[in-house]
Amino acid sequence: MPKKLTGIEIYKLLPKTNCGDCNLPTCMAFAMQVAAKKKALESCPHVSEEAKEALGEAQAPPMRTVKIGSGKKEFTMGGETVLFRHEEKFHHPTGVAIRVPDNMTKEELQGHIHNINQLHFVRAGEELGINLLAVEHRDGDKGKFAETVKEVMALSDLPLLLVCSETSVLQPALEAAGNSRPLICSATADNWEEMASLATQYQAPLTVKCNTLEECADLTAKIKEKGVEDICLDLTGDTFLQSFSNLIMTRRLSLEKSFRPLGYPTLVFPTSHQPFERAAEATACICKYCSIVVLEKGDSWELLPVLTVRQNIYTDPQVPNAIEARLYKIGEPGPEAPVLLTTNFALTYFTVAGEVESSKTSCFVSVVDTGGLGVLNAYADDKLTPEVVIKTIQEQGALEQVQHKKIIIPGLVAVLRMEIQEETGWEVIIGPEEAAGLPTFLRNEWRAS
Ligand code: SF4
């Protein structure tokens, strides 16, 4: 294992300008984070090539960053530095892949890829979708695998996993994939030398699969000696519990113990035969560090909870999840439309907006800048006060858009009502405490005059 450098040794090689471009206030703070393996040296854009060379392996992050594919849809995984996201953040969201077996007819394959291409969801203002396709050799016909790869590449620009253990079948598929850098799945104790040669020849990342983590560590070391650096660990066990425990142990060993032979991104194929259980397995794997989960079909009911969990886990806890504070129109609000008030915490706004849309009542929504805090937190932090509400409504000109002088505030901050009314003469209506109550409230309670 390379010698561990101290923060001072690393600091001596940094530019010492304290420019803050690494999101830390000083070069010393950055050096301490690099020494603690919580930041990669690459996070400083000004570090010299000489310093990189001098620091060598010692500064290498505990988990390698690996890229699959090329161009706009290139997928990046690994490079993680912490066990728990509140310690810093998780850097690369889990990739969600869908299986594409090579035993489909041409029509079935086209239909499958067409369905996958439609899988886009918008949640909290962010577009969610899948990242990879796992083309899998199942057919006895050896030529079919390469043909399927060609066909898939013509129909989709998502990066590929090539799932095939026979090198004679894999090579033509890699040839068909050209320079698109698919992830080869998987090298095992039996085929690793040939697989490593193919990975080198086609400049492609390689997955390693073994029965135990000890065997995995041995194999990654041997494959690395052959010159393959971009490695991924297939940690799928015989049972879900085994896969889950493999994920946790690998992350702990690589990050806490700096055990380099397991310092790679990971992949799991959820194995349950029950579709609901498979979706649950996939979400559990996302919560516990998995870099890629491979789903069976990509039905939207299966995919949506998986993508929702991924979105929640991979938000950056250091960055408020906020939207722009301004006056929003939902539907086509006219002079009699309600004026609702909410905060600029993205999830709060999009929940309110979703409920208003489903109520079929066009509204104005005045969004207060609370620094990305939800209603109660903003109130507790003095970011949602009568003064802030009045200033926001006036600056956004919300009541100039309508003929009435009424605003609807969230039920959770009913306490603001009297002061706003007394200061402005507006009528302040107490809305429901939960956004889910908005459709009924708008239908039964709202009257413009
Ligand atoms: S970006 Fe580099 S030079 Fe700037 S403060 Fe961070 S470590 Fe120092």
Image: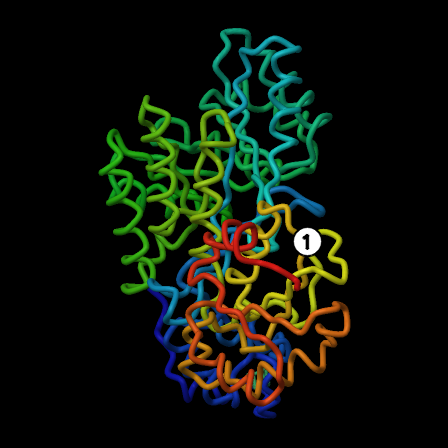
**Which of the image's four quarters has the C terminus?**
bottom right
Give residue 259's quadrant in the image. bottom left
Which amino acid does the dot numbered 1 rest on?
A: Ser
Q: How is the image coloured?
A: rainbow
| Residue 53 seen in this snapshot | no
| Residue 98 seen in this snapshot | yes
Does residue 205 lie above or below 138 as drawn? below
Ligand 1 closer than 8 Å to label 1 CB? no
Q: Between residue 87 and residue 400, name the one nearer to us.
A: 400
Question: Residue 262 in the image: x percent, y percent?
Answer: 34, 51
Question: Residue 339 in the image: x percent, y percent?
Answer: 64, 66
Q: Between residue 315 and residue 16, name the one nearer to us.
A: 315
**Which of the image's four quarters has the N terminus?**
bottom left
Give residue 422's quadrant in the image. bottom right
Report the label total: 1
Q: Residues within 10 Å of mark 1 (few under 14, many from 20)?
A: some
- 121 vs 332, left or right, is left
Question: Residue 237 in the image: x percent, y percent?
Answer: 28, 33
Q: Residue at x 58, y 45 (%)?
A: 358
Quadrant hosting ligand 1? bottom right
Q: Which residue is mark 1?
A: 362
